[in-house]
Image (spheres, rainbow, N blue to C red):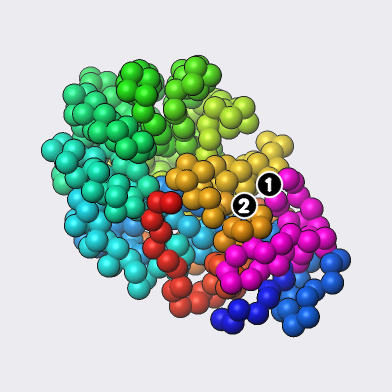
């Protein structure tokens, strides 16, 4: 594309100061100015007028399992980034596990970057992994530009990415705090999980009972205590148990360096509606009851929860057996997060500005990507154009995900992504995707 000035115009542009009619000028892939809607376009500028469709910043999804290389039959950079682009996401950060190799050494990071480079339709960054025995690898990974480190406190689901025990957790977090890095934690306590009734068979209620809220609550309490002791930055992944919200709120009020995410499935799907055998709804921690969901929304509204990210974790269909004991745990939602959340948010009286805060600004801030997550001068010209009132019914066959299995099949959702823009280029035009132009991101 040329360096010519581009002007994107809408009666509803979501900026950090609120929603307004505006003309956004773009030069060299960056937002130059946010001008009044009726501003005279500069001579020679190309003008794209979106009418009343909403112009929002491209979403930032910091929790995606791309599984490439090694388990590309589950997903892969090509399909994941196409699905993301179709869903209004312009930046994703890839999780360190389920690919082979996992991102647990700087060398493995190089391997992943090589694989991602030619396939990325959107900008892609990487998390590193903290596993038993790799404390020495954490600083080299940090220096190589990962956005932080993921660890598990309970089994991860794949043998090559074991969990940390409490001693290993303290060692890893101490090392990471030494360079002011970020540890992101799958917080379920393994002792609770072991003493819960084991699950086998198709009943969702049995699966839910096997992953009790106490497991999350206690793991989070322990993590908060450790973060406080080490003065370290920690982030709770995929919060499901609303019982942990008071602990989190108290820790934040006390100044503990703690952030928290939750996911579209916890905010839009409930245990009560999951049919037996429907393991497309299986994830860990699990989708809980509707009263729990109400409390999570309250946690978002009052700022206890910072952001909403997908935790897109697909597998092949054969691994989604109808037995909750052995089916793969993970929900596919990369392309659907925005409409799923917007549909629920509008029903609860939240605005699209709230959704943009939770799904763009806050995740960008989590990983320190100051160029992303807002429509403001100097930021990357990454956008989604959304018709917030249009509806569609989820047809799994129409998704860009490599495997078409999704917990949202058949749902009617509000919010149709009309186009997606990456650094001033339209990369998705009503589902027509361009050749990949994404860049690999490193921590600022
Ligand atoms: Zn995950």
What residue is disc 2 on?
374
Quick check: is 225 in the magenta stretch? Answer: no
Q: Closer to the camera, 14 or 282? A: 14
Quick check: is 18 in the magenta stretch? Answer: yes
Q: Is residue 151 above or below residue 247?
A: below
**Residue beneath the point at 70% across and 51% down:** 15
Label 2 close to label 1 by CB (< 8 Å): yes
Residue 193 horizontal/vertical position (percent): 26, 25
Residue range highlighted in magenta:
9-37
Residue 313 horizontal/vertical position (percent): 36, 50
Q: Secondary structure at mark 1?
A: loop
Residue most extreme to the left? 133
Side of 345 relative to 187 (left or right):
right
Residue 132 horizontal/vertical position (percent): 16, 36
Q: CA distance from mark 2 to mark 1?
A: 7 Å
Q: Closer to the camera, 96 or 368? A: 368
What residue is disc 1 on?
16
Q: Is residue 287 visible?
A: no
Side of 353 relative to 265 (left or right):
right
Q: Earlier in the sequence, mark 2 or mark 1?
A: 1
Total marks drawn?
2
The quarter of the image holding the N terminus is bottom right
Dot 1: within a 10 Å radius of its alpha carbon, few (fewer than 14), some, or many (20 or more) residues?
A: some
**Residue 178, image quadrant:** top left
Q: Is residue 118 visible?
A: yes
**Residue beneath the point at 53% across and 19% down:** 253
The main secondary structure of the magenta stretch is strand
Q: Secondary structure at mark 2?
A: loop
């Amino acid at each position: 594309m040329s360096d010519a000035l581009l002007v994107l115009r809408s009666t509803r542009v979501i900026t950090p100061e609120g929603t307004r009619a505006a003309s956004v000028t773009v030069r060299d892939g960056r937002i130059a100015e946010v001008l009044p809607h009726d501003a005279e376009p500069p001579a020679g500028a190309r003008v794209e007028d979106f009418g009343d469709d909403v112009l929002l910043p491209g979403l930032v999804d910091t929790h995606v399992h791309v599984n490439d290389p090694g388990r590309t039959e589950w997903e892969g950079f090509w399909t994941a980034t196409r699905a993301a682009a179709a869903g209004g996401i312009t930046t994703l950060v890839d999780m360190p596990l389920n690919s082979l190799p996992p991102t647990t050494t700087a060398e493995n990071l190089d391997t992943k970057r090589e694989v991602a480079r030619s396939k990325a339709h959107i900008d892609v960054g990487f998390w590193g992994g903290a596993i038993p025995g790799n404390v020495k690898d954490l600083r080299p990974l940090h220096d190589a530009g990962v956005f932080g480190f993921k660890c598990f406190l309970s089994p991860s689901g794949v043998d090559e990415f074991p969990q940390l025990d409490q001693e290993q957790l303290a060692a890893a977090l101490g090392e990471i705090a030494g360079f002011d890095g970020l540890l992101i934690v799958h917080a379920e306590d393994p002792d609770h999980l072991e003493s819960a009734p084991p699950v086998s068979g198709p009943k969702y209620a049995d699966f839910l009972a096997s992953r009790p809220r106490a497991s999350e609550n206690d793991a989070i309490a322990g993590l908060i205590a450790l973060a406080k002791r080490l003065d370290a930055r920690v982030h709770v992944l995929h919060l499901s148990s609303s019982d942990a919200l008071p602990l989190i709120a108290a820790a934040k009020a006390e100044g503990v360096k703690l952030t928290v995410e939750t996911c579209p499935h916890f905010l839009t799907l409930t245990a009560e509606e999951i049919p037996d055998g429907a393991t497309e709804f299986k994830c860990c921690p699990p989708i809980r009851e509707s009263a729990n969901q109400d409390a999570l929304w309250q946690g978002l509204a009052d700022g206890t929860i910072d952001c909403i990210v997908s935790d897109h974790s697909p597998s092949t269909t054969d691994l989604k057996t109808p037995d909750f004991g052995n089916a793969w745990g993970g929900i596919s939602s990369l392309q659907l997060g925005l409409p799923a959340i917007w549909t629920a948010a509008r029903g609860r009286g939240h605005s699209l500005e709230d959704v943009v805060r939770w799904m763009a600004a806050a995740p960008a801030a989590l990983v320190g990507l100051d160029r992303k997550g807002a429509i403001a001068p100097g930021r990357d010209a990454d956008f989604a154009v959304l018709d917030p009132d249009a509806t569609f019914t989820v047809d799994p066959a129409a998704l860009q995900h490599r495997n078409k299995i999704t917990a949202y099949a058949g749902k009617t959702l509000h919010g149709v992504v009309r186009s997606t823009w990456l650094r001033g280029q339209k990369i998705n035009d009503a589902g027509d995707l361009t050749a990949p132009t994404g860049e690999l991101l490193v921590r600022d």
